[in-house]
Amino acid sequence: MAAAELESLWEGVDDQRERTARLLEGLAPEQWDAPSLCDGWTVRDVAAHLTLQAQTLGDLLGLVARHPRMWRHPGLNGTIRESARVVAAELATDEVVARVRAGIGSRRYNSFVTPLETLTDALVHGQDVAVPLGLPLAMHPGPSALAATRRWDTRRSWLASVNRRLPLDGHRLRATDVEWVRGDGPEVAGPVGALLLLLTGRPAALDRLAGDGAEALRVRLGRPAPTTPAA
């Protein structure tokens, strides 16, 4: 990735971190403990996870050493979940928000991944908080398309193991707010941000998606049709 493209990516991360921090600042205490779009995660857990986007291997090992109960949850997903819960339990709400905001301007990212994964986390986890609370949180099409491309290209790699795998093979995903199309088959169409959520295993995204493919996925996943037309 060229230097200008990389800087544009990081500007997208910064923008989404700022938006998410503002949203978190306005939450009531009971909203922090509400379920997020991540199964078994509260809003507080997701927000705490967003403070852990620049960890080296040493940072992770230090966290495990301070909290040996994390060893009881082996595997990548177990480690990610428990590290978020540990931080969520340690930090006051204001400190969580402060740490999310402190990431603005940083160009560090977690070991073993790329800045594209940091972008995906900033975009998707913000929606994990906003969507179940019924709060608006804009996602710009450009960064969302970049993250969606990465998720599509790595959908069969180990990077996809952190997400629920939805049956998207045999569908055509088409964005309606930016030029972005992937796959073949019955169409799933809508904002590229919603397609990104679908690619990262969030069936709630179907509420904003339309087409024969979207309807087939709703039936297969047991989700009701949206009460308002998809946009």
Image (spheres, grey):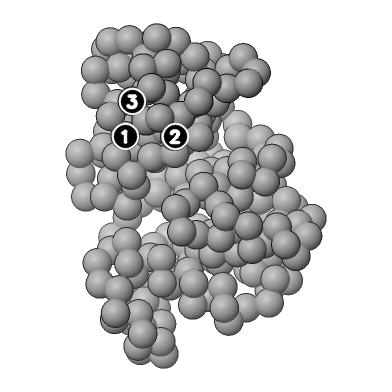
Residue 139: mark? none
Q: Residue at x 29, y 26 (%)?
A: 168
Mark 1 Cα shell of 10 Å, populated few (<14), some (14-19), many (≥20): some
Of the image marks 2 and 3, the number of the one nearer the N terminus: 2
Mark 3 Cα shell of 10 Å, populated few (<14), some (14-19), many (≥20): few
* Looking at the image, residue 104 lies above or below residue 226: below
Of the image marks 2 and 1, the number of the one nearer the N terminus: 1
* Looking at the image, residue 16 lies above or below residue 79: above
Viewport quadrant of the C terminus = top right
Question: Which amino acid is tagged 1?
Answer: Leu
Q: Is residue 209 visible?
A: yes
Of the image marks 3 and 1, the number of the one nearer the N terminus: 1
What is the CA distance from the residue labelled 3 to the residue labelled 1?
Answer: 10 Å
Nearer to us of marks 3 and 1 is 3
- In the rendered image, residue 117, in percent from the top left (x then y), is placed at 40, 49
Residue 220: mark? 3
Under circle 1, the secondary element is loop
How many numbered marks are there? 3
| Occupied quadrant, residue 70 | bottom left
**Residue linked to disc 1:** 166
